[in-house]
Amino acid sequence: MKCNLFLALLLVALFSSSAFAQKFTLFEAQNYAIENAEQMKNAAIDIEIAQMKIVETRAIGLPQINAEGNFNHFINLPVQVVDGAFIGQPGTLVSFRAGTDYSVSGGVAVNQLIFDGSYLVGLQVSKFYKEFVATNVELTQEQVLLNVTKAYELALVSRENLRFMDSLVSSTEDLLNKQRELLALDLILQEDVDQINYAFITAQTNQVNAKYQYENALSFLKMTMAYPMGEPIELLDNLESVLSQALAEVSSENSVDGNIQLDLLNKRLELSRYELKNTKFANLPSLGAFFQHKYDAYRNEFNFFDNNADWFEQTFVGVRLSVPIFSSGARWSRTQQAQLEIEKREFEINEYKRALQMQETQFINDLKSAKDKLKLQQENVRLATSIYKNSITRSEIGKENSLMVTQKYTQVISAQAQYVGAMVDVFNARLNIDKLYNNIIQK
């Protein structure tokens, strides 16, 4: 009995805990995405791969040890031809087969690189490549944060719009109920009630649309956060505080030089310089050392594992020097190509800087324009709402017909839609500026 009671309580606790929505501020939602988004996990793997590339490149200059073995079975022994004078038959050629039917060799070979210009450049590139990958990771992080911020702001706007629609439905329903009471007293016509009922149904339709827009915005937020789609979620920040941050003045200390994409282009330029350095160093001599110790055996029968079998030992060491002398212009051509690639990268960076400077002016103007429009639309909503409420009051006392009330309700809906669009424009303009200055990650 106690066990059953315990299980029942446990099930109730599990179901009740799953029913509660996890609450997030914008900052917490961003952190959650950084920790859980698959893009960030892949980026972390890229960093590990880059580290392994450093180890791989470094290993090229360390001793390379290999065990080597070889087995030969000659179906036809090779034929050797000598002058017959060796056997007392001058003027003739004597042929004979030399060797054994089977031969086996096995041993250990060690190779050590002593100097190679390309290897030295490769070490430098592998370390720099990790920085290059880290910048790509930063770019991925910026995109994840940008997506989460957009989704969170959109969800805040959708929630506020839903609340506004709820209030309109409530006020319109109150008016409809009062109109029905007046109709029952024969103080107004059925047409007046129908007109208000039409406005009420329209308000309910807008309310339903706002509700599903809010749910879609939450789903989009879950997706960008890598949050379980089936789990409920709740926003802790309010629209006013987030909007006030978006409306803050742009600091004069910001600079396009901090742009991540520009940093990535500069790193690509540095890789091109390493490529030029590598083509030049490839013209230097390379030097390596080697050591080999092996055993050879020769048999006419396959008896290599007999105790009395002879094995011939061989050990040698040496150095290998390679000096480039003449390549028919191939090395010169590769050097020129690498130099031209550097010039292309420099032109690309100069062009991108101008584009960033143009975007800086455009995005700041977009934010100013969005701020001005937001103030106007905010006042427009206030006026339309005030007119609508006054119209309701006048209708209640019989000084205004229902058609006028419906028209003024339509004005409220139109003003609210424009106000919502103005808020979204402010958020988007601010995000464009923050991305331009690499402020999304810094924030």
Image (spheres, rainbow, N blue to C red):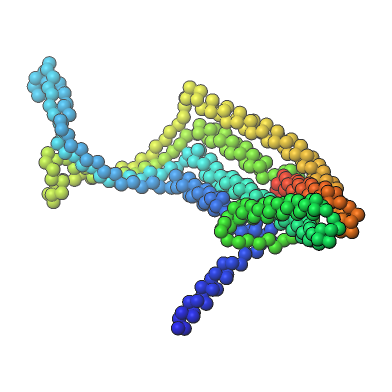
Q: Is residue 87 visible?
A: yes
* Farthest residue, direction left: 88
Picture coordinates of residue 243, whole percent (x, y)? 77, 54
Picture coordinates of residue 116, whole percent (x, y)? 48, 39
* Farthest residue, direction right: 399
Nearer to the camera, 88 or 437: 437
Identify the image quadrant of the C terminus.
Answer: bottom right
Q: Is residue 224 left or right of residue 178?
A: left
* Farthest residue, direction bottom: 2
* Residue displayed at 45% across by 42% down: 114
* Residue displayed at 82% across by 43% down: 369
Q: Relative to residue 242, is residue 433 depicted above or below?
A: above
* Farthest residue, direction front: 186
Picture coordinates of residue 21, whole percent (x, y)? 62, 64
The image quarter in which residue 355 lies:
top right
Picture coordinates of residue 226, whole percent (x, y)? 58, 55
Q: Relative to residue 438, is residue 270 depicted above or below?
A: above
Nearer to the camera, 387 or 284: 387
Q: How many marks?
A: 0
Nearer to the camera, 178 or 87: 178
Q: In this view, does 398 lie to the left or right of 83?
A: right
* Residue displayed at 30% across by 47% down: 67
Identify the image quadrant of the N terminus.
Answer: bottom left
